[in-house]
Image (cartoon, rainbow, N blue to C red):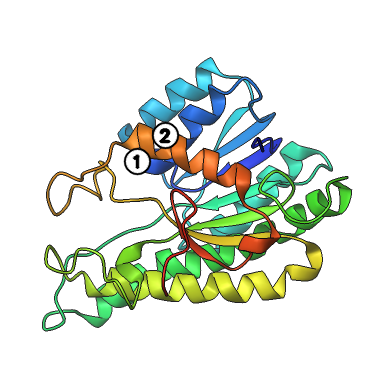
């Protein structure tokens, strides 16, 4: 059975929801990563206290300020991680940070669309570009053949709400700007998978399920527990390989329609 053993991981949006739960479960593993870079917009704010407590208890958890919508913040975070790694590479980048704005087709605004796209799509692009040299380094120095999340990978947290075929939860909320952003993120993932293929950097878009987070409960209580789904996600990541490069999958690894 495959195991997930990346030594150096970065997770954006780590102060709550899926991002925080990923950090919690990663530090609890017997074969836990050497470094977990947990990023969020405001590490000193009230919303990051749980993350700060976690970092205080576990060596190797480093909180990095990162606003994915701000190019200067992205650049500064990449420099800080590069300095911390002292010549080592980054094995797994999880682009988890994202926002949602409630809207309908009739009342959607250019401002909402721009803000959500800036964070969910452009932010993921800028972060991936900034950390690409570290991902390349990890891939080049790995003795592993092929692609894996333990070697060098970018995981973009997407949503089935952005599936043009499925439109998960349309009857509960149209959220047009969010859906459009996730459809665009899926295309970005496909482009990355082709652009970084020669570097053997695995690129996958993953729908984490409709889980009980602040965002997930926005249209009523979500049907899936956060801890249970994140545990399944981590197991799924251990099985992803070059056959999944550029794919759109759910938390169990099942391929979803675009």
User: From what the image shows, is residue 187 above or below residue 58?
Assistant: below
Neighbours of disc 2 within 10 Å: few (<14), some (14-19), many (20+): some
Q: Are marks 1 and 2 in contact (CB under 8 Å)?
A: yes
Quadrant location of the C terminus in the rendered image: bottom left
Residue 64 seen: no
Outermost top residue: 57
Specify whether 174 is left or right of 119: left
Query: Residue 240 at what x, y percent from top left?
Result: 62, 52
In percent of the image, x 30 and y 66: which residue is there?
A: 161
Q: Which residue is mark 1?
A: 17
Q: Nearer the viewer, residue 212 or 126?
A: 212
Query: Residue 247 at what x, y percent from top left?
Result: 55, 66
**SS type, badge 1:** helix
**SS type, badge 2:** helix
Q: Nearer the viewer, residue 149 or 125?
A: 149
Q: What is the number of the mark on residue 21? A: 2
Q: Which of the 4 quarters of the picture holds residue 169?
A: bottom left
Q: Which of the 4 quarters of the picture holds residue 214?
A: top left
User: From what the image shows, is residue 108 above or below residue 122?
Assistant: below
Query: Residue 116 at what x, y percent from top left?
Result: 34, 68
Neighbours of disc 1 within 10 Å: few (<14), some (14-19), many (20+): some
In percent of the image, x 42 and y 66: which residue is there?
A: 256
In percent of the image, x 27 and y 71: which residue is there?
A: 167
């Amino acid at each position: 059975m495959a195991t997930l053993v990346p030594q150096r991981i970065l997770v954006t949006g780590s102060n709550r929801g899926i991002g925080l739960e990923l950090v919690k479960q990663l530090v609890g593993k017997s074969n836990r990563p050497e470094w977990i870079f947990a990023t969020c917009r405001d590490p000193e704010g009230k919303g990051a206290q749980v993350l700060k407590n976690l970092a205080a208890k576990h060596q190797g958890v480093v909180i990095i300020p990162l606003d994915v919508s701000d190019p200067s913040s992205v650049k500064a975070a990449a420099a800080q991680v590069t300095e911390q790694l002292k010549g080592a590479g980054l094995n797994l980048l999880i682009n988890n940070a994202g926002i949602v704005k409630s809207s309908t087709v009739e009342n959607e605004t250019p401002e909402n669309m721009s803000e959500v796209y800036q964070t969910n799509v452009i932010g993921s692009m800028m972060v991936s570009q900034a950390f690409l040299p570290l991902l390349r380094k990890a891939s080049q120095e790995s003795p592993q053949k092929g692609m894996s999340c333990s070697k060098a990978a970018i995981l973009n947290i997407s949503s089935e709400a952005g599936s043009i075929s499925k439109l998960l939860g349309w009857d509960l909320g149209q959220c047009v700007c969010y859906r459009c952003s996730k459809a665009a993120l899926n295309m970005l993932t496909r482009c990355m998978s082709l652009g970084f293929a020669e570097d053997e950097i695995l690129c996958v878009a993953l729908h984490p399920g409709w889980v009980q987070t602040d965002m997930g409960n926005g249209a009523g209580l979500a049907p899936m527990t956060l801890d249970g789904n994140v545990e399944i996600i981590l197991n799924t990541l251990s099985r992803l390989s070059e056959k999944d490069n550029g794919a759109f999958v759910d938390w169990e690894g099942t391929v979803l329609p675009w």
